[in-house]
Image (cartoon, helix red, strand yellow):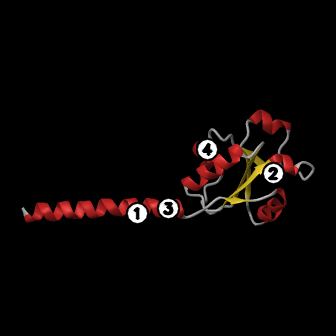
Amino acid sequence: MKKILFIFVCLVLLSGCGNDIEEEKKIVADVKKITCADVNPLVDKGAIIIDVRTSDEYKVDHLENSININNDVIKYTIGNYVSDFNTPIIVYCQSGNRSAESADTLVNLGYTEVYDMGSITGCYGEE
């Protein structure tokens, strides 16, 4: 009986540890808001630029050297483009809504340096 009680107590204690680890992972990074002026210095330091709009929107205009990964699929495909969770990632869209959503998704996936530029409209002429 004592062995069963001991095993039960150990299982309860161990199950609580897993939740703490998950919580720590979620707190590792916060999304940083940036402007167009901040993009080039970050790219010089190795940042990847991701346009999270549709492919049709991307074809009309986009920032130079950006990758088009639609907001709807970014959580499934980002690993094909960025495998190092410490790589700086800049996201942008048309109005700022999809980039905010994508930035949160990336942080929740474990990426540690995520920048939300918001809307591309302020960057016209800076491509």
State the separation of the CA atoms marked 4 and 1.
28 Å
Amino acid at dot 4: Thr
The numbered disc on residue 65 is: 2
Quickly name the residue at label 1: 20
State the separation of the CA atoms marked 2 and 4.
18 Å
Which of discs 2 and 1 lies nearer the camera? The answer is 1
Quickly name the residue at label 3: 25
Quickly name the residue at label 4: 77
Q: Secondary structure at mark 4?
A: helix
Identify the image quadrant of residue 8: bottom left
- Label 1: how many Cα within 10 Å (few below 14, some 14–19, many 20+): few
Q: Secondary structure at mark 2?
A: loop
Amino acid at dot 3: Lys
Residue 115: percent from left, percent from top: 70, 58
Residue at the image position 31 percent from the left and 59 percent from the top: 15
Q: Point out the tag, 1 or 3, that comes first from the N-terminus.
A: 1
Q: Point out the tag, 4 or 3, that comes first from the N-terminus.
A: 3
As drawn, the residue found furthest toward the right would be 125
State the separation of the CA atoms marked 1 and 3.
9 Å
Residue at the image position 64 percent from the left and 47 percent from the top: 102
